[in-house]
Each structure stands twice: as structure tokens, then as C-alpha cells.
Amino acid sequence: MYNPEPVYLFLGPEIGQKTDEIIKIRKSFQTQSGVSPEIHKFYPYDTSIGEVISLMLNGSLFSNYKFVTFMNIEELKKESIAELISYIKSPGIECTLFLVSEKNSVDKKITTAIPKKNVRIFWELFENQKKSWISSYLKKEQIEITDDAIDMILEMVENNTNDMRNACSKLSIFFGINSRIEEEDIENFIYHSKEENVFTLFKKIASADFSSSIEILHKIALSGEGTPVQLISGLQWQFRKLLTLSQLFSKQYSREEALSKAQIRGKRNQQTYIDGLRNYSTQELQKIIVLIAKYDILARELNKDNHLILMELFIYYCVTKKGNLPEAYKS
């Protein structure tokens, strides 16, 4: 019978491949054992490591085996790390624990406590691999896609196969088999779909429309699509592009040259960034980048009950205050 290891440590930015590996291990166990295991997933900000360990060590009325995934382990405090190390040295017999982080390394005490064969770093794909991945996925769905359209998809999603898979799945449903997707089709899909996302949120923030930005934020929150950390990460990426564009314009590049150098494609997408330049100066954009870094830390530290108000405050200081925080918040 297939016996998974008691503890795995999966690191690195490639979320999709990590998820695939976890699912593969679970399926192998279920197929060979005939047991339907319990599946659990936890985060440091809403569940203590002590609670997770208690779950893993105690028996269950529903299954003979448990698979537990503990995300963002880089956020564990010293005392929690000590508890975790103690468990790793004497793990539960009928449980497998996946320790997951998007970082490439975590506290050495954790790494050294786990056998090297159970530690794996999932690196981000190279650009040509990402393009090939998208092309292959859609080809299986009997959909043809141009290189420019693939480039635009990669601009609009986080650089991991999990987000690429989600995007391609939506595209395949929307366009259907035997279709051909071009760059303009991707742009139309993004801005005409009924879903609100980090890109439609950025569009309203770039236009300095505070009330509409808050409205979109609430719709995203209700849909459950995107945590504050993910939203802030997506906004940071777009604001960095806007800052780059602003700096290129200050160096007297033409509109076409600046947009090309900043790798901003698609007419509607380009217009969003041009609107942003009308509402935010280079200096204000630099302040917003700093603001984003501060709120990224806060989003990781606060529990999820405070996430919505945190994002509302972020948008307020971004749109209304142009990145200027009160003196009390600058330290």
C-alpha cells in the first residue's frame, strides 16, 4: 500500500504545481488504500499550530486518515515553530502534514527537522514555459490562441500555473471549442465579464474614483475571489507598471514608446494607465508603492475579520490621500 510521508515542506512561488503535487499524493493514497481521507487546510492568522497539532494527533469518527495543509508557514512565531518541531519529531501515525510557503526558504529549524527528500522548492516557470503551458492547455480544449493574446493573459494573471489554469478555464468556457482567441478578445473578455477582479479594481483606483473602487472591493469580498494579500500583490504589480510609465514619460518618451517599454498592451488596458498618469504624479506613485508595502505587512498580520476595513483604508489613502499617511502611521 502507498504510504505518504508524515510531513512535507513545499516552498517557492509556483502555487499551481505545489497544489498539483499535494493532490497527486492524496489521490495515490486514496486509490491504493481505498480510504477516503479527511482534508483540512489552515492559515497561521486564523488557526494556531497547537490546534492543528491537536487535530492531527486525535482520532476521527469519519476517516482513518487525515491530510492537513498548513499555509504561509513563514509567518509562524518562535513559540509556534517550537511546537511544530516537536510534532515533526514525533508525528501522528495516521496523518500527513503539508507545510507550504511561497517563500524559497523558511526558518532553518523547520527545514532541518524534515528529511531532505520531503523538502521541495517549486520555482516559477520561465516565460517560454508559461506561454507553452497556456497554449497546450487551450489546445486540449480545441482552442487556438495567438502569441499576442498569450502575452496579454500573462500580463493579467499572477505568474503561477494555478492562476493561469483558472484564467484559461474561464476563457475556454467563454469562447468554446473550435474558436480562435486574439489579443482584442482577451481585452474584451476582461472588461466585459461580469466578474470584478484586481484589474477592474485598479481601473477605478487609477481613475481616482473612490466610491466605485470601494464598491468593486465589496463585490470582490462577497465573491470570495482574492484575499487582501493577493489583491495588494496585484495592485502593487500594476502600480509599478504605472510608475515605470510615468518615469518614461518624464524622460520624454512618446506615448507609443513608453507603453511598449512598460509592456502595457491592449487599447483599453493602455487607456487605464494613461488615465492613471492624469491622476497621480511620479512622486505620488512612489508614495503609493511604499504604502502598498506597509499594507502588505498588515494584511499578513491581521486576522481575516479586519481584512475588509484594512482594504477600505488602503484605498482611501491611495485614492484620496495619494499615498500620504498620517505621521502616526509612518513608522
Image (spheres, grey):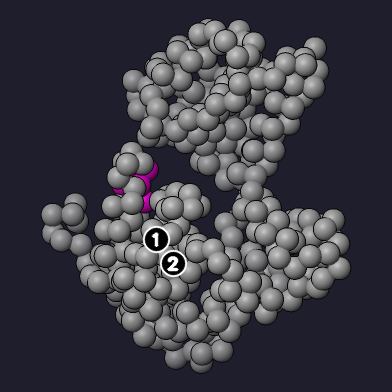
Residues in magenta, as a range: 295-300
Q: Are marks 1 and 2 in contact (CB under 8 Å)?
A: yes
Q: Is residue 159 left or right of residue 138?
A: left
Q: Is residue 318 left or right of residue 70?
A: left
Amino acid marked by disc 1: Leu
Q: Is residue 86 left or right of residue 166?
A: left
Asked if residue 268 lies in the magenta stretch, the reply is no
Q: How many marks?
A: 2
On the image, the x and y values in percent for residue 215 come to 37, 65
In front of the other: 117 or 132: 132
Residue 66 placement: quadrant: top right
Q: Which mark is residue 201?
A: 2
* Dot 1: element: helix
Q: Is residue 158 above or below residue 36?
A: below
Amino acid marked by disc 2: Leu
Which residue appears at 73% of the width and 61% of the height?
173
Q: Is residue 237 visible?
A: no
Distance between mark 1 and mark 2 Cα atoms: 7 Å
Residue 213 placement: quadrant: bottom left
Residue 65 placement: quadrant: top right
Which residue appears at 56% of the width and 89% of the height?
256
Magenta stretch: dominant secondary structure:
helix
On the image, the x and y values in percent for residue 117 come to 67, 23
- What residue is disc 1 on? 217
Asked if residue 299 lies in the magenta stretch, the reply is yes
In front of the other: 12 or 219: 219
Q: Which mark is residue 27?
A: none
Q: Where is the N terminus found, in terms of image quarters?
A: top right
